[in-house]
Image (cartoon, rainbow, N blue to C red):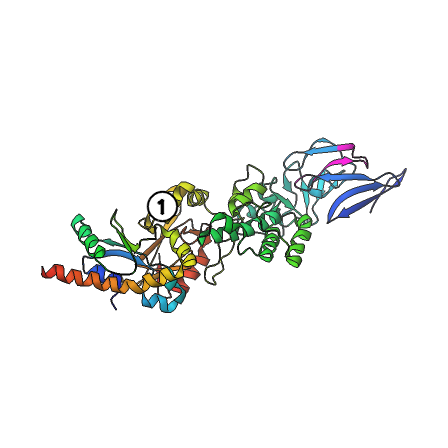
């Protein structure tokens, strides 16, 4: 199962990132599976073209959870659409833990989708 | 009972106490005189049994008599004044209110981390409006019991808010009366009106009957402390707070003798700044920089793995642990200010222990 960071790396060199999702993390802290995932990363060379492509790729993903990709500023982010800010993570965890579980289970599929799209882009 | 002898007469003064406070005096067979103290416990007003003023005494900050008189020698901060010498007997040492100094050196240094404590003749860290000295050795903060309880309650509320609760729910959910009572005891231990508040704290521990509606206590730790302290005592606003525990890691309370940087603390609690803390596109490095700028001193600490792509696990509030490459926090040297983990400064050693527990291989610079 591909990690979301590895998938995003296929699109450019990442300078730094943070992510609250992943098998290794869940093996240490199993309850984190109920926290909606939030991925924040920074490309070394972020370009508007790259942002546009990723927006298109993520928008084309067919899943059970609606995802939101933001590319404003240096840090780009990917999270379920219900997460408007950081404080929403703990709220959603308490109010709707199933949402976090569903999103965390879907994130690897989204990662795979992003990785495949990068391969197709390189072929084209 | 106190007996005063002179060539002409023998005077017996009987004192009456309630809750450890000297509240009344009877001289020989006269009527009772009721004694009233100020916030330091200094005898300030005497009334008769009808409530009429008998006498009043006013003090300068360090205890020298400003005006008036009292029918008792137990005057400034409730200590006995040797009227013939003009000195106060603080048990371990004599204190001269004119010089604002003890006339003997303290045999101990009560708080080595506090530079004010290193002057062994100084009275109450040179802050006599806030502290009292019960035994000539240790300055105590006045009101700390109440502050401790309020801050303990506030800490629980802040913990609730940090975990995402709305304010209304945060005021009443997961409130532990025993912890509040313990906070009161800690507050007193940190130095306060021990005698007055001990029964309150004890009853809370025993009965656990504290109302959790929030009406009588302020909503959050910082506000609670502010409400209870004298207006100009901003330091106490941030003293004695304690960050909510994180997954079993218990943080120590703020040390009242070594307060966190007030500029960084204010920035962290600034309502206008909350959107940046909650904005996931805003970096920890940017937050650390902002706090550093607000503080005007200190440094930005960096936590990272042993190699470039070794991840580290970073704690955040609301049961959230993140993987990061580098994590930046502002520190004033004694405390870490990491608002995404806690709005209360965390003692540096505690933060280090938590980070090392999560990342045994991580490096901190």
Q: Is residue B332 left or right of residue B310?
A: right
Chain under label 1? B
Check the image and report above or below for B337 versus B49.
Answer: below
Question: In the rendered image, which quarter is residue B56 located in?
Answer: top right
Residue B12 is situated, as x and y percent measured from the top left of the image, at 86, 43
| Observer able to see residue A23 | yes
Q: Is residue B69 left or right of residue B186?
A: right
Q: Which residue is mark 1?
A: B276
Mark 1 surroundings: few (<14), some (14-19) or many (≥20) residues within 10 A? some
Residue at left offset 49%, top offset 55%: B244
Residue B235 is situated, as x and y percent measured from the top left of the image, at 52, 42
Q: Furthest-top residue in view?
A: B67
Q: Is residue B263 left or right of residue B256?
A: left
Q: Is residue A47 left or right of residue B41?
A: left
Residue A23 is situated, as x and y percent measured from the top left of the image, at 32, 68
Number of numbered discs on residues: 1
Magenta stretch, residue numbers? B38-55
The local secondary structure at tag 1 comes to helix
Residue at left offset 20%, top offset 54%: A54
Residue A5 is situated, as x and y percent measured from the top left of the image, at 25, 61
| Observer able to see residue B296 | no
Check the image and report above or below for B132 versus A99.
Answer: above
B157 inside magenta stretch: no
């Amino acid at each position: 199962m591909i990690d979301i960071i590895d998938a995003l790396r296929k699109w450019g060199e990442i300078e730094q990132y943070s992510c609250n999702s992943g098998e290794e993390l869940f093996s240490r802290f199993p309850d984190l599976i109920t926290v909606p995932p939030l991925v924040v990363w920074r490309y070394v060379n972020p370009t508007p073209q790259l942002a546009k492509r990723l927006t298109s790729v993520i928008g084309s993903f067919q899943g059970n959870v609606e995802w939101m990709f933001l590319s404003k500023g240096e840090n780009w982010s990917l999270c379920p659409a219900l997460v408007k800010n950081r404080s929403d993570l703990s709220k959603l965890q308490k109010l709707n833990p199933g949402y976090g579980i569903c999103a965390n289970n879907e994130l690897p599929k989204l990662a795979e989708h992003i990785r495949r799209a990068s391969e197709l882009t390189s072929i084209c | 009972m106190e007996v005063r002898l002179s060539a002409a007469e023998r005077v017996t003064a009987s004192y009456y106490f309630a809750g450890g406070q000297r509240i009344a005096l009877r001289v020989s067979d006269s009527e009772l005189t009721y004694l009233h103290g100020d916030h330091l416990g200094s005898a300030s007003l005497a009334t008769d049994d009808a409530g009429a003023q008998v006498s009043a005494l006013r003090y300068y900050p360090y205890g020298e008599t400003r005006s008036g008189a009292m029918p008792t020698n137990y005057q400034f901060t409730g200590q006995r004044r040797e009227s013939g010498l003009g000195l106060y007997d603080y048990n371990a040492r004599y204190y001269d209110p004119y010089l604002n100094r003890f006339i003997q050196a303290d045999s101990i240094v009560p708080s080595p981390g506090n530079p004010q404590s290193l002057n062994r003749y100084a009275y109450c860290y040179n802050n006599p409006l806030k502290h009292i000295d019960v035994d000539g050795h240790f300055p105590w903060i006045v009101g700390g019991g109440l502050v401790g309880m309020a801050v303990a309650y506030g800490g629980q509320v802040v913990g609730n808010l940090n975990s995402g609760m709305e304010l209304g729910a945060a005021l009443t959910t997961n409130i532990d009366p025993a912890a509040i009572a313990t906070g009161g005891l800690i507050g007193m231990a940190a130095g306060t009106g021990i005698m007055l508040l001990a029964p309150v704290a004890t009853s809370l521990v025993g009965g656990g009957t504290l109302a959790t509606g929030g009406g009588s206590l302020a909503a959050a730790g910082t506000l609670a402390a502010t409400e209870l302290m004298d207006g100009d005592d901003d330091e106490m606003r941030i003293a004695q707070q304690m960050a909510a525990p994180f997954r079993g890691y218990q943080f120590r309370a703020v040390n009242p003798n070594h307060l966190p940087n007030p500029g960084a603390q204010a920035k962290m609690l600034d309502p206008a700044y909350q959107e940046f803390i909650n904005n996931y596109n805003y970096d920890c490095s940017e937050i650390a920089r902002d706090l550093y700028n607000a503080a005007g001193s200190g440094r930005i600490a960096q936590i990272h793995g042993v190699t470039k792509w070794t991840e580290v696990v970073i704690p955040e509030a609301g049961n959230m642990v993140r993987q990061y490459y580098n994590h930046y926090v502002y520190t004033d040297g004694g405390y870490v200010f990491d608002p995404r983990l806690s709005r209360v400064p965390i003692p540096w050693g505690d933060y280090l222990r938590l980070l090392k527990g999560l990342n045994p291989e991580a490096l901190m610079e």
